[in-house]
Amino acid sequence: MGFDNSAKRRIPSKGRRMIRRHAFTLIELLVVIAVIAVLAGLLLPVLSRAKAKGEQAECLGNLRQIGMAMALYVDDNDQRFPDRRDLKRSLPGGWKPWSSWPASDPRAGWASIVLSNYVVGADVWSCSSSRRAPFNDLVQIAQRTSAASNAPVTRYWMWRFDRADDPVPLDNFWSKAAGQAVADLKAAKNPAAGNPGGTADVELAVDGYFPDTIPAVDAALKGRSVHAGGRNRLFLDGHAGFLKDTRTPR
């Protein structure tokens, strides 16, 4: 009995058709690449915003820890804030080693030293966003706590501990009790502080920021803040929150 050779000839042809059926054409590959590019373009901004929100939350947590540390210090020291104007003058760079804004020196290197027994870890004084350029080594933001090359660096501002004058200015809190500090701040009529009704209205610590409405701000820094669009703030009563600010869109 003979064999049907036509069936044998069909097998290779069918195999070739199957190979072609499972291969991608150049057009199909280009379409897939285009879809991936579109999805990436949609997802990357979302991921970027999520990362920024995470860093903002981290920073807010740092400020709350600083607030608790200051409260513990005050409880242990006759209900008075520390007075370390000597550290304001003696830490690396001295007091206000710049000529532009801000007009005082709110850097918090002194506080990280004074509150070291109440705060766990030096990272509390520097959030992820502030460790990136240009804030990582900006003279108005970063302050080493000693001359050592590996000394911890602080990157928060504490406005009411921002001068080294003697006697203590009305709008500074060195060695004052909270009640006196608020009363003196009201008497100082500092327009930046407004007219506080109590400790809940008084800012204690904040991220660095450079409003685009202040002429003295360096052009490269105008409108910039550690957290674009606003800043985290810690208040004297211990609560903290994010303040949106159109003056710092970047």
Image: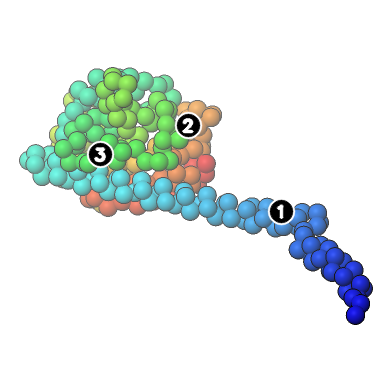
Q: Residues within 10 Å of mark 3 (few under 14, many from 20)?
A: few
In this picture, residue 43 sits left or right of residue 57: right
Mark nearer the viewer, 3 or 2: 3
The answer to which image quadrant residue 103 occupies is: top left
Question: Which residue occupies 19% across, 43% down?
Answer: 69
Residue 209 x, y percent position in the rendering? 43, 38
Q: Are marks 3 and 2 in contact (CB under 8 Å)?
A: no
Residue 168 shown left or right of residue 60 in the figure: left
Q: Secondary structure at mark 2?
A: loop
Where on the picture, by quarter, is residue 137? top left
Q: Which residue is mark 2?
A: 134
- What is the x, y in percent for residue 142? 37, 29
Q: Helix, strand, or loop for circle 1?
A: helix
Q: Distance of mark 3 from mark 2, alpha carbons?
A: 23 Å
Q: Residue farthest to the front? A: 1
> Where does the image place residue 60, in percent across and percent down from the top left?
34, 49
Residue at the outermost left position: 78
Q: Nearer the viewer, mark 3 or mark 1?
A: 1
Q: Nearer the viewer, residue 24 or 45?
A: 24
Q: Amino acid at mark 1?
A: Ile
What residue is disc 3 on? 121
- Front-lying residue, 101 or 37: 37
Q: Earlier in the sequence, mark 3 or mark 2?
A: 3
Which residue carries the number 1 mark?
Answer: 33
Residues at marks 1 and 2, CA–CA distance in whole angstroms: 35 Å
Rendered residue at 43%/41% (across/down): 129
Label 2 crowd bin: few (<14), some (14–19), many (20+), radius 10 Å: some
Given the image, on which type of amino acid does mark 2 rest?
A: Pro
**Can the viewer see residue 182?**
no
Q: Amino acid at mark 3?
A: Gly
Instruction: Report the number of numbered marks.
Output: 3
